Image (spheres, rainbow, N blue to C red):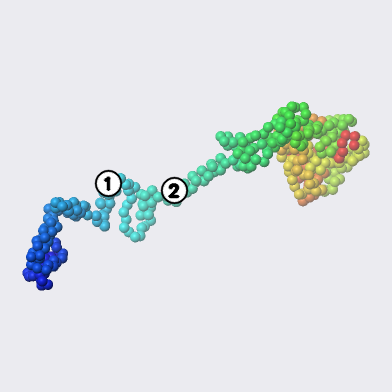
């Protein structure tokens, strides 16, 4: 586009108008002389403003800057759309990784394309997810296994684990560290069954804070007494804890002989078997040890001299009802090392015990043709044998030596 210098003198434009370099305005003057001077100045300004470009840019680039000397600075054109070669070149030049990605312009992919895309781009499929979930579960189990309070001692970090992360005074701290001290007068129940404030033996509570054989300990600090004692007549033993007086068995071939067996019932359910018609009348009729109230023990009473899993057995099917069943107030061991499974203190004074089944006076309330029995061969209880079977018996009464 041409631009013109319009000269106005005395209000009238002079003609012809002259083309000049980039002067975008008209000059106004009051007379010809001043107009000429202004025109000369404008021409000078136009000549100075007009720059002659002395360079050009190659294909694919454009002028970015024109210097005062006419030289140009070029820059590469940036397309808004890149072809695949340009993308690949850009990725390679800038250190990116394609990860074997593929370009697909379809708007709908078939299953093979999806599988290929997943594999090429290292995404997880169902099998991968299942494997990861299995690994997560394994890690969670491992973390759980390491936790204090799970009941499993982790030897690298724990010295005990009682199944909770609470210090309840049993000898295992809230951080699963063992702190029991035998002889401090406090029973740390995970490790001690007694603590009389000392560690000397011979007083009922031994050097490891366990009751010594034939002793019974209670309280804090513990007070220990001999649990069993042989009465002066030599044929009975007293349990000072339960208040029971027991028949002492023999091998003399009489009514007290350990090898004798008796039936509970001869008619099916009634207490009329030989245990009731022969054994007990033989003791009471002769005023054995000066007493005439001998009987068969209830099942909880047999539990008090048993050793093994049966000492904690509880059942509602007991007749008569026996609320002491399974409460184990005398702290019997729940594991039997060898038969007969009987309390060692009792065994030492009570004469021989058959490693077999002993009748109790307790019937099976759910089916009275059966009676409860203590199995001294295994330390367990059962109620599956008919009362007509011949088993072993031991008599008991409530009392003590001399009473």
Q: Quadrant of the C terminus?
A: top right
Secondary structure of the residue carrying tag 2 is: helix
Does any portion of residue 305 appear in the rendered image? Answer: yes
User: At which x and y percent is residue 125?
Assistant: 42, 51
Circle 2 is placed at which residue position?
128
Report which quarter residue 390 is drawn in. top right
Measured in 3D between alpha carbons, the distance from the residue under mark 2 to the one under mark 1, in whole angstroms, is 33 Å
Task: Measuring from the top left, give residue 328's x and y in whole percent.
Answer: 75, 41
Q: Local crowd at mark 2 within 10 Å, few (<14), some, or many (≥20)?
A: few
Q: Position of residue 367 (x, y in %)?
A: 78, 50
**Along the horizontal axis of the image, is 100 left or right of 270?**
left
Looking at the image, residue 20 sits to the left or right of residue 324; the answer is left
Mark 1 residue element: helix
Q: Tell whether 48 sits left or right of 316.
A: left
Residue wearing tag 1: 93
Question: Which image quarter: residue 17?
Answer: bottom left
Q: Quadrant of the N terminus?
A: bottom left
Name the residue located 56 percent from the left edge and 43 percent from the top edge. Answer: 144
Residue at 12% x, 61% y is 42
Camera-side mark, 2 or 1: 1
Residue 44 drawn above or below residue 132:
below
Residue extending farthest bottom: 12
Is residue 176 placed above or below 12 in the rendered structure? above
Q: Position of residue 364 (x, y in %)?
A: 78, 48
């Amino acid at each position: 586009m041409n631009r013109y210098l319009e000269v106005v003198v005395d209000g009238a434009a002079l003609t012809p108008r002259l083309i000049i370099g980039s002067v975008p305005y008209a000059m106004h003057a009051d007379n010809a002389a001043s107009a000429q001077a202004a025109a000369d100045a404008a021409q000078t300004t136009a000549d100075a403003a007009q720059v002659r470009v002395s360079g050009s840019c190659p294909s694919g680039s454009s002028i970015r800057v024109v210097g005062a000397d006419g030289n140009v600075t070029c820059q590469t054109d940036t397309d808004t759309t890149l072809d695949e070669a340009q993308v690949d070149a850009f990725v390679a030049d800038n250190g990116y990784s394609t990860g074997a990605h593929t370009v697909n312009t379809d708007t709908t992919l078939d299953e093979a394309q999806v599988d290929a895309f997943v594999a090429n781009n290292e995404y997880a499929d169902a099998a991968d997810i299942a494997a990861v979930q299995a690994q997560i579960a394994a890690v969670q189990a491992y973390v759980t296994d390491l936790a204090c309070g799970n009941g499993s001692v982790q030897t690298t970090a724990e010295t005990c684990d009682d199944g909770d992360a609470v210090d309840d005074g049993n000898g295992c701290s809230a951080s699963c560290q063992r702190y029991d001290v035998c002889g401090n007068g406090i029973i740390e129940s995970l490790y001690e069954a007694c603590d009389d404030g000392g560690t000397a033996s011979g007083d009922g509570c031994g050097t490891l804070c366990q009751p010594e054989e034939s002793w019974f300990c209670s309280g804090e600090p513990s007070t220990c007494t001999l649990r069993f004692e042989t009465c002066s007549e030599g044929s009975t033993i007293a349990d000072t804890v339960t208040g029971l007086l027991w028949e002492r068995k023999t091998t003399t071939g009489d009514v007290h002989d350990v090898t004798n067996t008796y039936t509970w019932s001869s008619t099916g359910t009634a207490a009329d078997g030989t245990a009731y018609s022969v054994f007990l009348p033989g003791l009471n009729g002769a005023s054995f040890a000066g007493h005439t109230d001998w009987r068969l023990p209830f099942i909880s009473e047999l539990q008090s001299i048993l050793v093994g899993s049966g000492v904690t057995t509880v059942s509602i099917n007991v007749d008569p009802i026996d609320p002491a069943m399974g409460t184990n107030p005398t702290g019997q061991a729940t594991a039997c090392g060898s038969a007969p499974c009987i309390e060692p203190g009792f065994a030492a004074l009570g004469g021989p015990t058959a490693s077999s089944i002993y009748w109790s006076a307790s019937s099976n309330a759910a089916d009275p043709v059966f009676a409860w029995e203590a199995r001294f061969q295994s330390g367990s209880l059962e109620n599956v044998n008919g009362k007509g079977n011949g088993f072993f018996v031991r008599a008991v009464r409530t009392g003590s030596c001399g009473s």
